[in-house]
Amino acid sequence: MTTIYWSKSKPGFYTSDVMGVSAMPPDVVVVTAVTYQALLSGQSSTQVIGSDGSGNPVLQAATPPAAPS
């Protein structure tokens, strides 16, 4: 069974079937399949995936691009 992980230090998802846990960043946290799907859905509707204070992935409002100077 595949386990999904999130890393705050290297923002991204990792899966146990592609990479062994020992090769992942040291701050990975386990993400449920339901949470993973919700995060991807939010990301496809203008939100971005970031991390909370505990390193868990959360949806955040996207930062608008800076105006040209």
Image (tube, rainbow, N blue to C red):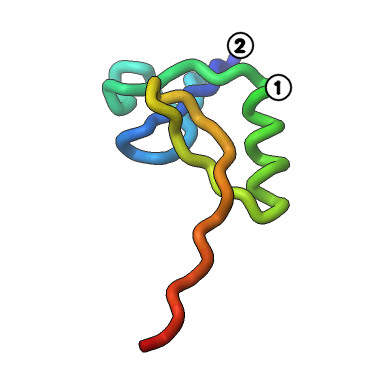
Crowd class of label 2 (few under 14; some 14 to 19; many from 20; radius 10 Å): few
Q: Which of 69 and 38 is in front in this view?
A: 69
In the image, residue 40 above or below residue 46? above
Q: What residue type is labelled 2?
A: Met
Q: Position of residue 8 (x, y in %)?
A: 37, 33
Cβ atoms at labels 2 and 1 below 8 Å apart: no
The alpha-carbon separation of the residues under discs 2 and 1 comes to 15 Å
Q: Residue at x 70, y 22 (%)?
A: 34
Q: What residue type is labelled 1?
A: Val
Residue farthest along the top direction in this orientation? 1
Q: Which of marks 2 and 1 is nearer the N terminus?
A: 2
Q: Position of residue 22 (x, y in %)?
A: 29, 17
Would you identify the image quadrant in which residue 38 lies?
top right
Q: Residue at x 72, y 41 (%)?
A: 41
In the image, residue 56 above or below residue 10? above
Q: Is residue 30 left or right of residue 10?
A: right
In the image, residue 37 above or below residue 65? above
Q: Mark 2 points at which residue?
A: 1
Element on which disc 1 rests: helix
Q: Nearer the viewer, residue 67 or 48?
A: 67
Q: Which residue is drawn at 47% across and 24% down?
A: 56
Which callout, 2 or 1, points to the residue nearer the camera?
1
Q: Position of residue 29 (x, y in %)?
A: 43, 18
Q: Residue at x 47, y 39 (%)?
A: 50
Q: Mark 1 points at which residue?
A: 34
**In which quadrant of the rendered image does the N terminus lie?**
top right
Would you identify the image quadrant in which residue 11 lies?
top left
Element on which disc 2 rests: loop
Q: Position of residue 4 (x, y in %)?
A: 54, 22
Q: Is residue 25 left or right of residue 37?
A: left
Crowd class of label 1 (few under 14; some 14 to 19; many from 20; radius 10 Å): few
